[in-house]
Amino acid sequence: METSPLKHLLLALFFSAPAFAIEAFKIELHDRKIRVEAPKSVSSQYAVIVENLSLNDVVGKFHSAGKDLKFINVKAGLTRTVEFRHTGKGAVRFQPLAPAFQEVELTAGKKTYEIPSQP
């Protein structure tokens, strides 16, 4: 029986000491929108849960100021968790590459926000 990466992340966060817990972004990929749940704050270590609720597999990347930070491939109906460091000054963005969709800026403290598809 295989356990999901989300379950591993939640268990790790639950059993970690509060001083070392990493708050995570959650990105939900839908067919016509992207929904982001943001933590109150973020340090240089990013944790992002990407849940693909669309009918298509999604390939995307996290980048900042022209520098690629992490690439990800999430099959339809599955969830992946990624971690990466960002010490630069530019905002971190998630850009779906295939299928193409508008990119999303990861903004801490914004709580929940949605990005609709552009016509």
Image (spheres, rainbow, N blue to C red):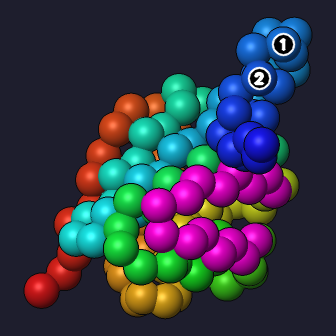
Q: Is residue 101 above or below residue 20?
A: below
Numbered tag placed on residue 49 in the rendering = none
Indicate the secondary structure of the residue bearing disc 2: helix
User: Where on the picture, by quarter, is residue 19?
Assistant: top right
Residue behind mark 2: 11
**Is residue 43 shown to the viewer in this render?**
no
Indicate the secondary structure of the residue bearing disc 1: helix
Q: Position of residue 9 (x, y in %)?
A: 75, 34
Residue at 51% over, 78% down: 58
What's drawn in magenta, residue-wise?
70-84
Asked if the magenta segment contains residue 86, the reply would be no
Label the magenta part by its dominant secondary structure.
Answer: strand
Instruction: Count residues near mark 2 (Cα–Cα under 10 Å), then give few for <14, some for 14-19, many for 20+.
Output: few
> Looking at this view, is 85 or 25 the one in front?
25
Q: Position of residue 72 (x, y in %)?
A: 68, 72
Q: Amino acid at mark 1?
A: Phe
Asked if the magenta segment contains residue 77, the reply would be yes
> Looking at this view, is 66 or 26 the one in front?
26
Q: Amino acid at mark 2?
A: Leu
Horizontal side of 23 relative to 109 (left or right) equals right
Q: Quadrant of the C terminus?
A: bottom left
Residue at 42% over, 88% down: 99
Residue behind mark 1: 15
